[in-house]
Image (cartoon, rainbow, N blue to C red):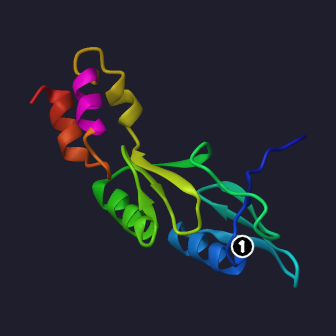
Amino acid sequence: MPSATPFLWLQHPIDDVAAFYTRLFDGDILSEDYGPTMQSATIRILGQTLHLFNAGPYRDLTEAFSLMVTCSSQAEIDRLWDELAHDGTPTQCGWVTDRFGLTWQIIPDRLEEWLRDPEHGAEVTARMLEMVKIEIAPLEAALRGD
């Protein structure tokens, strides 16, 4: 059976990248190859396999590809956001590009449901658009009509 695995060309030492992501997400390094002209590793985080690759400065990641992580609490959002934003670039609505150039969306696990709420979804959206890091309490307040 075929499978699809994101193949990420990063311009950083792959052993550093693999160690950071597997520590942050309590993941595993499945394979490693750190040769003189190329570095690669396959990791698994949050049930997703990722192949990390560095063979020089020929390709750049963009925000056109991101990994969305859904969190069940503000504490989870805060922990992940703080780690990913450290030396990274926060943007808007829970998006942050980490120091390795990979973009993440760190959001509440019920966000899509809240945004589709027929009565208050527009207010949830408006409040979210004012945020950089997602804060659950103001979104829940908007959902209640507060």
Residue 146 in which image quadrant = top left
61 displayed left or right of 124: right
> What residue is shown with label 1?
29
120 displayed left or right of 55: left
Tell me residue 58's x, y (percent).
79, 62
Q: Residue at x 37, y 28 (%)?
A: 113
As helix, strand or loop, the secondary structure at mark 1 comes to: strand
Tell me residue 90's x, y (percent).
40, 57
Q: Looking at this rendering, what residue extends furthest in the left direction?
A: 146
Q: Residue at x 29, y 38 (%)?
A: 128
67 falls in the magenta region = no
Residue 119 in which image quadrant = top left
Q: Looking at this rendering, what residue extends furthest in the front direction?
A: 58
86 displayed left or right of 139: right
Q: Nearer the viewer, residue 113 or 94?
A: 94
Tell me residue 134's x, y (percent).
31, 48
Q: Looking at this rendering, what residue extends furthest in the top direction?
A: 118
Residue 86's place in the image compared with 115, above or below, is: below
Q: Which residues are magenta?
A: 122-129
Please state which amino acid type lies under the numbered disc 1: Ile
Residue 105's place in the image compared with 78, above or below, is: above
Q: Nearer the viewer, residue 133 or 140?
A: 133
Within-10-Å neighbours for mark 1: few <14, some 14–19, many 20+: some
Q: Residue at x 32, y 29 (%)?
A: 114
Residue 82 in which image quadrant = bottom left
Q: Nearer the viewer, residue 128 or 88?
A: 88
Q: Residue at x 41, y 65 (%)?
A: 85
Q: What main secondary structure does the magenta stretch of the protein show?
A: helix
Quadrant location, the N terminus: top right
